[in-house]
Image (cartoon, rainbow, N blue to C red):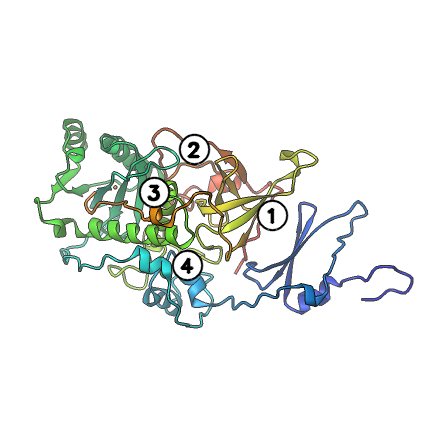
Amino acid sequence: MLVPGLEENLLSVGQMVKHGYYLVFGGNLLNIFNGWSLDNLVARVQMTNNRCFPLTMMLANQLALKASVTRYLQIWHKRLGHLNDRSIKLLEDQEIVHGLPHLEKTYVVCEGCILGKQHRDSFPSESTWRAKFPLELVHIDICGPMKTESISGNRYFLLFTDNCTIITWVYFIRNKSNAFECFKKFKAMTKRQCGYKVKGLRSDRGGEFLSNEFNKYCNELGIQRQLTMTYSPQQNGVAKRKNRMVVEMAKSMLYEKGLPYEFWTEAVNTTVYILNRCPSKSLKKVIPFEAYIGRKPGIAHRKIFGSLCYVHVPSTLRHKLEENSHKCIFAGYRLCEKGYKVFDPSSKKIILSRDVLFDKNASWKWENTDKNEMRVPMFAENQMANCSEGQKQFEVCEPSKSLDTSTQVDEVITPQIEDMFESSQAIDYTPQK
Ligand SMILES: [Zn+2]
């Protein structure tokens, strides 16, 4: 737009919207995106004192133009934790989640999948018996020890999978002996959050599940123990299969962005979050999340794990000369559907925020990262919460040194927690589709 007498040209917001740009105002900033997914940031402009947004344009011959197809199957493959094409098509065709666009199939070799999913032995078929009610039978399995401690100092993860709905919870622990404490927390959490009671517990005969206190606790509460025979992993097939899926997806996500080992807990936590929202062979036209919670989740907010991102720092939390945004690494989802967990490499802290911009093509340049050392020796075959995290709009957490706990599904059953954030001035960049 040209205004006679004015020394600057004016850009019309309406014209830009008409041409497919998405403009997000907030925090004294204007962010201009090319496409509704808000993945492609075209420009970010600081508001001046006279409440204008001066945009300096470079000549075209100075720019490197970026071409992108936002509905690429490969992008969603990575956002969904390297999920296989068949399952992604099921999500789309059966409309069992909200927010997944129609995807155009293109064949691209995925390095993350090649490196993370080499192990392909067939798995023993499981029993055909299925529980009729949530938590009628819970499968428990432990994985570890990892060669590298997590940022919080944990070495194992413990998986709880509900036989009826296939929904899974993961807890990270430092020692195998923490498994009993984890089970007590899991049992209390599920009863408190949804009213279901654990009636049966199936595990292998690992010492962590056979302690006197574990047995006594289950006996007193009438929880039926089912212990698999040694060398018969198919008797706990649900847990073993889920265990392997978690390990493979987590490894693929770590490889994809070249993340250091210490991030294995974040990768595993994100994987469980994703798998709870993916099709399962054991369920028909429903995903574990809906089977347990009773509604479809939205997935339009998904991003590629490990991507470089920028967290907007509210003015109340920064000094005058500090930058508005902080460069971080995407480390997973908050339990609500519109929040992100990011890792700040400079402070080595986890930040929870809704106000995050992503650069899916960029990765953090880790110092002294040897690609060979990125092989996650991880996860021995037989052995397994979630990260506890504050539920605030913007929060900095010290990685916990104690037992991490988390639940993958409590966002929908504790709506009062979400209500606390409604008054926040932070901006939600998540597409509402
Ligand atoms: Zn992949």
Q: Which residue is mark 1?
A: 427
Which of the marked residues, 3 or 4, is nearer the chain's N terminus? Answer: 4
Q: CA distance from mark 1 to mark 3?
A: 30 Å
Q: Quarter holding the N terminus?
A: bottom right
**Amino acid bearing label 4:** Lys
**Amino acid bearing label 2:** Pro
- Residue 194: mark: 3
Q: CA distance from mark 1 to mark 2?
A: 25 Å
Question: Whole-percent x and y of residue 311?
Answer: 57, 45
Which of the marked residues, 1 or 4, is nearer the chain's N terminus? Answer: 4
**Amino acid bearing label 1:** Ile
Circles 1 and 2: CB distance less than 8 Å?
A: no
Q: Residue at x 28, y 59 (%)?
A: 280
Q: Quadrant of residue 378?
A: top left
Assess mark 3: CB under 8 A from ligand 1? no
Is 428 or 319 nearer to us in this picture? 319
Q: CA distance from mark 1 to mark 4?
A: 25 Å
Assess mark 1: CB under 8 A from ligand 1? no
Q: Is residue 198 above or below residue 174?
A: below
Q: Residue at x 30, y 50 (%)?
A: 246
Q: Secondary structure at mark 3?
A: helix
Q: Which residue is mark 2?
A: 399
Assess mark 4: CB under 8 A from ligand 1? yes
Q: Is residue 284 above or below residue 162?
A: below
Q: CA distance from mark 3 to mark 4?
A: 31 Å
Q: Nearer the viewer, mark 1 or mark 2?
A: 2
Which of the marked residues, 1 or 2, is nearer the chain's N terminus? Answer: 2
Residue 408 visible in the displayed image: no
Which of the marked residues, 1 or 3, is nearer the chain's N terminus? Answer: 3
Which of the marked residues, 4 or 2, is nearer the chain's N terminus? Answer: 4
